[in-house]
Amino acid sequence: MHERSSKPKSIFSVLALLAIVSISQGPGLPAQEKDTVVNKYSAGLFSSRTGSRIPYRILEPTSVEPGEKYPLVLFLHGAGERGSDNQKQLVHAASDFASPDRTQQFPAFVVFPQCPTEQRWVESPWDLPSGSGEFDATPSKPMKAALELVDNLVEELPVDPARVYVTGLSMGGQGAWYAAAAKPRRFAAMLEVCGGGDPTWAADYQGIPIWALHGQKDSVVPISRAREMVVALTKAGHAPELRYTEYPGVGHNSWARTFKRDDVFEWLFAQRKRE
């Protein structure tokens, strides 16, 4: 547990300690047909130890070399992509991970599980101004299944256990905050986009590199959710790295530019788990 500072800092003074990055929307990758993206991700169905089943899609390295081990990325989608068709979860970011440039530079397994309709990665409202005390110690059924899926894939595939990452957007960003802190520790880094965490969990992220990105004008998940996590982590003395990007004038769809950024991919795949 970390003690509170005797002189609490304002949110603005804490944020001033961080590099708040302003990025203009640059040219994105060429548009890819939906069917082309879907076909790059093999379909699967996972039966977890709890008896729940979760559909997923997985992208594999273009060429798996004998004896080599590769990173694994868990991607948690947003509320609009829930269902059981095992396709809708690929609407956002999947084409960016599957683009030829990305797969050549960053060969990896990238898994997109699909949360069932009317369920959530974290059973807590995402539109609250604060997430304090909102995370339950017991994961939701979809979250438990997704984490067990990761464990299963690490055992079955040529995955480097020191390079397992979690990322997500909106409801999935909230899920990324949960998954990164869940025990046992699975992830070498967390890349979180426009979600909200629980600041009372700040100490649980110690040792995990974090990059959180959020649109300043987000009307779905308030910007206060990102700022309170940055403040809590800073007060907790978070190490080894905390990055925060706030996009001025941008609404909820901050993922549209985030997953087009080369530096985001370079940062994520450079991380290694610290024992």
Image: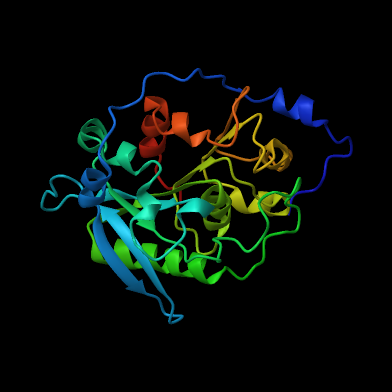
Residue visible at 25% across and 52% down in the picture: 41
The residue depicted at 26 percent of the width and 61 percent of the height is 43
Q: Which color mode does the image show?
A: rainbow
Residue closer to the observer: 240 or 83? 83
Q: Is residue 268 left or right of residue 99?
A: right
Quadrant the N terminus occupies: bottom right
Say above or below: 213 vs 171: above
Identify the image quadrant of residue 182.
Answer: bottom right
Q: Quadrant of residue 97?
A: top left
Camera-side residue of 222 and 229: 222
**The one of 215 and 136 positioned closer to us in this rendering:** 215
| Image mark count | 0
Locate residue 101 relative to residue 6 in the image: left or right: left
Name the residue rendered at 34%, 71% in the picture. 46
Residue 45 drawn at (x, y percent): 31, 70
Horizontal side, residue 160 vs residue 174: left or right:
left
Residue 44, image x, y percentages: 27, 65
Residue at the farthest bottom position: 51
Comparing 188 with 32, the one in front is 32
Res. 60 in view:
no
User: Is 70 positioned to the left or the right of 263 in the image?
Assistant: left
Residue 111 picture quarter: bottom left
The vertical placement of 213 against 55, above or below, is above
Residue 136 visible in image: yes
In x, y percent, where is residue 238?
Answer: 63, 40
Q: Position of residue 151 (x, y in %)?
A: 37, 65
Which residue is outermost to the right? 6
